Image (cartoon, rainbow, N blue to C red):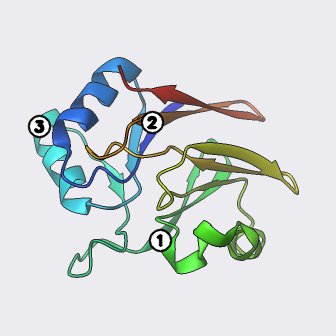
Amino acid sequence: MRILVISDTHGNYPSAVRAIDQAGQSDHIIHLGDVADDATAMEHALGKSVIKVAGNCDPTSTVPKELCISFAGRNIFITHGDSYNVKSGLSQLRKKARSTKSHVVLYGHTHMADITRSEGILFVNPGSLAEACTTKSFARLIISGNRISAEIVSVE
């Protein structure tokens, strides 16, 4: 299973489209907020559902702030990250991941791509697609049997 993960588009819909095209076939697309309306626009353009959460720049959104989902028997906790102070580290997010029995945590907010494995949990921040960011990136999450891996991909 291949999952495309994007975050922090901040209205830069063209970069999101480039990321989707560059990623190729994905079983699911996840948008981690800032701006959740971009994810809705992507749904209409693609004719495909986008799993989405709201970020700190989505104060009036009806989209949930966080989700727990399961793919191929793997629990995935999805959040923008601002509620867990991720700019100061992953300790609060790690605690939440343990309480939700998550194998993977997807978060954004920092605009810095990162993949970290800690206490058996894979933490993935795809970076940002905002126009102001000099390095635009997305993440590809791959679930194959019991193996979960992720990679960061720069948008060309």
Task: Please give left or right for residue 47 compared with residue 55 in the image.
Answer: left
Q: Is residue 24 visible?
A: no
Which of the two discs, 3 and 2, sits closer to the camera? Answer: 2
Query: Which residue, given by chain and number where applicable, does mark 3 sit on?
Result: 45
131 vs 150: above or below: below
Residue type, mark 1 in image: Glu
- What distance separates the C-alpha of mark 3 from that of mark 2? 19 Å
Q: Quarter holding the N terminus?
A: top right
149 vs 91: above or below: above
- Give the crowd class for mark 3: few <14, some 14-19, many >=20 residues within 10 Å: few
Task: Please state the total of marks drawn on the protein image.
Answer: 3
Query: Which residue, given by chain and number where applicable, does mark 2 sit on?
Result: 138
Task: Please give left or right for residue 105 compared with residue 118 in the image.
Answer: left
Give percent across and percent down for residue 29: 38, 41
Give percent across and percent down for residue 122: 73, 48
Element marked by disc 2: strand
Task: Please give left or right for residue 152 compared with residue 52 in the image.
Answer: right
Residue type, mark 2 in image: Phe
Q: Please tell me which of labels 2 and 1 falls first in the chain.
A: 1
Residue drawn at point x = 71 percent, y = 61 percent: 102
- What distance separates the C-alpha of mark 1 from that of mark 3? 24 Å
Give percent across and percent down for residue 93: 68, 70
Query: Which residue, given by chain and number where applicable, does mark 1 sit on?
Result: 66
Element marked by disc 3: helix
Residue type, mark 3 in image: Ala
Residue drawn at point x = 76 percent, y = 75 percent: 95
- What distance separates the C-alpha of mark 2 from that of mark 1? 19 Å
Q: Please tell me which of labels 3 and 2 falls first in the chain.
A: 3
- Give the crowd class for mark 1: few <14, some 14-19, many >=20 residues within 10 Å: many
Say whether marks 1 and 3 touch (CB < 8 Å).
no
